[in-house]
Image: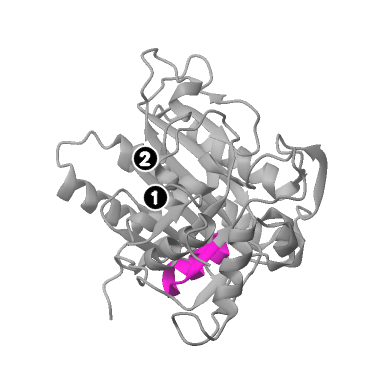
Amino acid sequence: MREPITIERHILEQQQRGFPKATGDFTQLLYDITFATKIISREVNKAGLVEILGATAKENVQGETVQKLDEYANDVIRQTMDKTGRVSVMASEEVEDVILVPQNYQTGRYVLLFDPLDGSSNIDANVSIGSIFSIHRKISEDGSGQREDCLQPGYRQVGAAYVIYGSSTMLVYTTGNGVHGFTLDPSVGEFLLSHRNIRIPKSGSIYSVNEGNYTHWEQGAQRFVDYLKSKDNHLGKPFSLRYIGSMVADLHRTLLYGGIFFYPRDQKDPDKPVGKLRLLYEASPMAFIFKHAGGYASDGEQDILTIHPSELHQRTPLIIGSKNDVKLAEEFFNGNRD
């Protein structure tokens, strides 16, 4: 029998190996995240029984209808984190401005950005959904956190994680020292190590994209998909198309099996912000995870992790996956390949 390793033990061992003199605040912050996601997982798994499916009457800052589970997950994460003394400020995809620590509570050295429930439009169809987390160090001088603490490029992240709520609940995280996956054992209520040191293949044979938007893409994206579907590509056979429509689920498969996921610019509305995915809450943390698993993420022109954000809810195109496949996509997107 393989020795069971809990996520708490794994995080502590990572700290002792890499940062033996650390205070433990970062380690405890990671464990706070796992605690919050256990609560969310419990509600997701019984959502139809507790009348938490469906939409609220609200719209979020993105102009999207807020699902009941979206709202619930956002509240759980905020309430789990804001009084611990480990974060200075937070930002959520569901909230227009930064989330400050309540007055009279201690602030910490870390900044937490999160998408509380990615793929929420699929909730009622029982499709896999997820949560995404990005952690930075505080850079502002004041005691309490500021907006500038949240507007940091992805390469400054000190940790990132996602949780997928599917046939099982799985958490994948990195602190820059490998990417590791843990599966929630509901019988003991613990995340147990199931995927040690995940490495994405350098190339793959699967592509993941909403091809229904093909006519609205720029020509480079169209040519790239045409190339992937051709038997004359570098594989000598068409790539397989796999698209769930829940980004965490699509990227989880891509991380494990290799290949490429992309959401290119949409040209159907010239006034629409460039790209669809949120830089701080989706693209940047996922790019950080993929980088430390041997993958790569780009907006078609540059590494996602090098982008300096100017807005909390900034959007971006995203190409992410096996390094060789993303580099090839960049050639098409930049017009350097027919």
- Is any part of residue 83 visible from this angle? no
* Residue 95, image x, y percentages: 65, 32
Q: Nearer the viewer, residue 136 or 210?
A: 210
| 309 to 279, vertically: above or below | above
Q: Residue extending furthest right? A: 57
Q: Position of residue 220 (x, y in %)?
A: 58, 60
Q: Is residue 319 left or right of residue 15?
A: right
Tag 1–tag 2 contact (CB < 8 Å): yes
Which one is earlier in the sequence, the residue at label 1 or at label 2? 2
Q: Secondary structure at mark 2?
A: loop
Residue 37: x and y, percent?
A: 52, 51
Q: Is residue 255 magenta?
A: yes
Q: Which residue is mark 2?
A: 157
**174 displayed left or right of 217:** left
Question: Would you name the residue on which mark 1 appears?
Answer: 288
Rendered residue at 48%/54% (across/down): 162
Q: Main secondary structure of the magenta part?
A: helix
State which region is magenta. Answer: 248-261
Residue sitting at x 39%, y 14%: 143
Q: In the rendered view of the protein, which quadrant contains the N terminus? A: bottom left
Q: Is residue 139 magenta?
A: no
- Identify the amino acid type marked 1: Phe
Depth check: 52 or 124 in front? Answer: 124
222 sits to left or right of 1: right
- Rounded to the nearest angstrom, the CA distance separating label 1 from label 2 is 8 Å
Give above or below for 254 relative to 217.
below
Tag 1, which secondary structure?
helix
Q: Quadrant of residue 125?
A: bottom right
Q: Count residues near mark 1 (Cα–Cα under 10 Å), then give few for <14, some for 14-19, many for 20+.
A: many
